[in-house]
Image: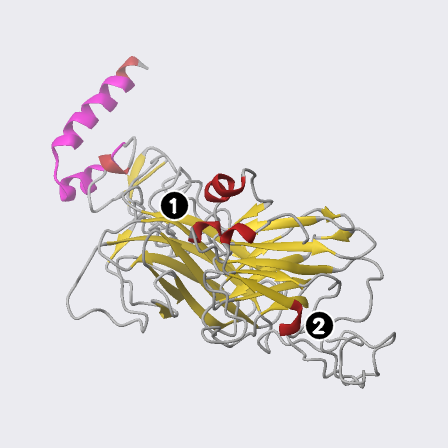
Amino acid sequence: MSAARSIRGVALVALAACGPFACRLMGSIECASSLDCPTSMPVCVDGLCNESGASDGGVLPGDGGDDAGAPDAGPVDGGLDAGPDGGPDGGPDDGGADGGAVDAGPIDAGPYDAGIPIAVPIAPQGGHVDFTGALGPTDATMMNRPFETCTAPGQERGPYYVDSFAVVNQTGEQQDIAVGALWTGGDGYLLLYRGGFDPTTPTVNCAGGDDDTGSAAMSAVPRFAIAPDEIVIIVASTFTVQATIPDYLIEVETRGADAGVTVDAGPLDAGPLDAGDDAGPVDAGPLDGGSDDAGVDAGVDAGPRGPSLIITEVVDHPGDPLVRFVEIHNAGDEEASLANVRLRRYANGQSFPIGSVQLTGMLSPGATIVAAHDTASFHAMYGASPDYASLAVDGNGDDVYELVDNGVVVDIFGEVAVDGTGQPWEYTDRIVKRAAGVVLGKKVWEPTEWVFSSDGASASPGQRD
C-alpha cells in the first residue's frame, strides 16, 4: 500500500508539470475542484478532471455561475447560470436576473427589483389608500426628474429627491383611479409609471403626471386606468433641485371603470352626485326638500329617523390659515357609525377630491366632531385638540367639502367642479355655520341653510350653535 501511495504521489508531481497534450497522454488528472483542471478537461468529476459537461457536484459555492452544464447545487452564484436555476435562489436579493424561477417572495428585499417596490392593493370602488412621507437629504434615492409629459428636460437638472410607492389592481376588473398629492412646506411633482420605475432611466415606463393642479400645494391625475393585476408606480419628487418637502400626503381613490358613477343601489343612487334623478320609484316618506318629491330630490329623505350626519361649521380663519377646520354633527336620534364615512375636499373647481379624512368609531346622537388642518395651531387657538388632523382639511375659501358614507354623498358644502371664488358660498377668511334647526344633509348645496361671518371670534369648534 505504501508503494502505491508513492507511485500515485510521483504521478501527481509529473502531471503538475506537464502540458495539456502530455497530460492527456499520461492519463487523468486528480482534482479537488474544477480550478485544478486544464481548459481541455475543465470539469472536476469524482476527483478527476474530465471533458464532460456534467454538473460539478455543487462543490463550488460560487464559481461565477457560468457553468456549461447544470447549475451549481451550492448557494447563490449570481443568478447567471446557463441552465435553469431549478427554483428560486436562496439569497435575499440577487438582482432578479435569474434565468429560472422568480426569486423567493413576490418582490426582492432590495429597494428596486425591476423597478417595483412592495405593491399595495387599491381599495374597492369608492375607497382609497393613502401614502405619506417627506422629501429631503435623508432620501437615498434621487433622479433627474422628467416633465409631467414624461419628456426629459432640455438639459440635465437635479438630482431631485424622490420617493416611490406601488399599487396593484386585485379587484378582478379594470378600474379608474384618481391620484392626488398634497405638499406641505414645499412644491412637489407627481409622476406615474407602468411596468416598473428605475430612477436612473426616469423617462422609461413613464405614463404621465402633474406638476401643479391650480396650486403649488397639490398635484393630481384625476383619471388613470389600471388593468387587472397591473402594478402602477407612484413617484413623489420635488420641483426644485434638492429642495425639501417636510410632509406630503398621496391619496389613490378607486373610481371604477365609469369614473365612479355607480348604478342605482335602490331608491337613491350610490354615485357621488346623482342630483336626485333616480330612475326608480319616488322616494318613500314625506317631502324632503325636492320640487314636489317627483324623484328630483335636493337632499336626503326626511328624518331625522336614525342617525343624520351633517356638516355644521366650515372655517378659513382670518387670523391663522393653519386653524382651518370642519365640524361634523349627528343631528339624528340614533348613534351613527363612522366606519365608512369620509370628509372629502375638492380644490379650485376640480371634479375629483384632492384629499379626504377617514372617520372612525361611533358618533352619539347630538354629538359633534372636528377635523382640522394642524393640531398644534388648533390647540393654541382653542385650548383643545381636534378629533382629526389632516392636510386634506385645507379649504382656503373656494374649495368644496363633501361628506360621504360608503361612497354615497350625505352632505355637501359648495358645488363640485365649481371654483368658489366669487360664488355665493365663497368663505375666504370667514366662518360659516349651519343654520339652527337644520337636521338633514343635502346632496346639493343649499345657500339658505348657511350663515357667514368674518369675525374669527365667532368660530366655535365642537359646539352645535
- Along the viewing direction, whichever of 465 and 281 lies nearer the viewer: 465
Residue 18 versus residue 378 in the image, above or below:
above
Would residue 191 appear left or right of 391 to someone viewing this image?
Answer: left
Using a 10 Å C-alpha cutoff, classify the residue at mark 2 as few (fewer than 14 neighbours), some (14 to 19) or many (20 or more). Answer: many
Residue most toward the right?
Answer: 285
Residue 76 makes an appearance in the image? yes
Residue 110 is labelled as: 1
Range of magenta residues: 4-30
Q: Position of residue 128 (x, y in %)?
A: 57, 60
Mark toward the viewer: 1 or 2 = 2
Residue 119 makes an appearance in the image? no
Q: CA distance from mark 1 to mark 2?
A: 42 Å
Q: Is residue 26 magenta?
A: yes
- Residue 235 occupies quadrant: bottom left
Q: Residue at x 76, y 77 (%)?
A: 289
Residue 270 is labelled as: 2
| Quadrant location of the N terminus in the rendered image | top left
Residue 199 versus residue 364 in the image, above or below:
below
Would residue 259 appear left or right of 19 to someone viewing this image?
Answer: right
Q: Position of residue 28 (x, y in %)?
A: 26, 37
Instruction: Return the disc, 1 or 2, that comes first in the chain's sequence.
Output: 1
In the rendered structure, which amino acid carries the disc numbered 1? Answer: Gly
Q: Position of residue 13 (x, y in %)?
A: 16, 26
Would residue 15 appear left or right of 205 to someone viewing this image?
Answer: left
Q: Is residue 197 magenta?
A: no
Residue 63 versus residue 186 in the image, above or below:
above
Q: Residue at x 23, y 38 (%)?
A: 37
**Which colour style is shown?**
secondary structure
Q: Secondary structure at mark 2?
A: loop
Using a 10 Å C-alpha cutoff, classify the residue at mark 1 as few (fewer than 14 neighbours), some (14 to 19) or many (20 or more). Answer: few
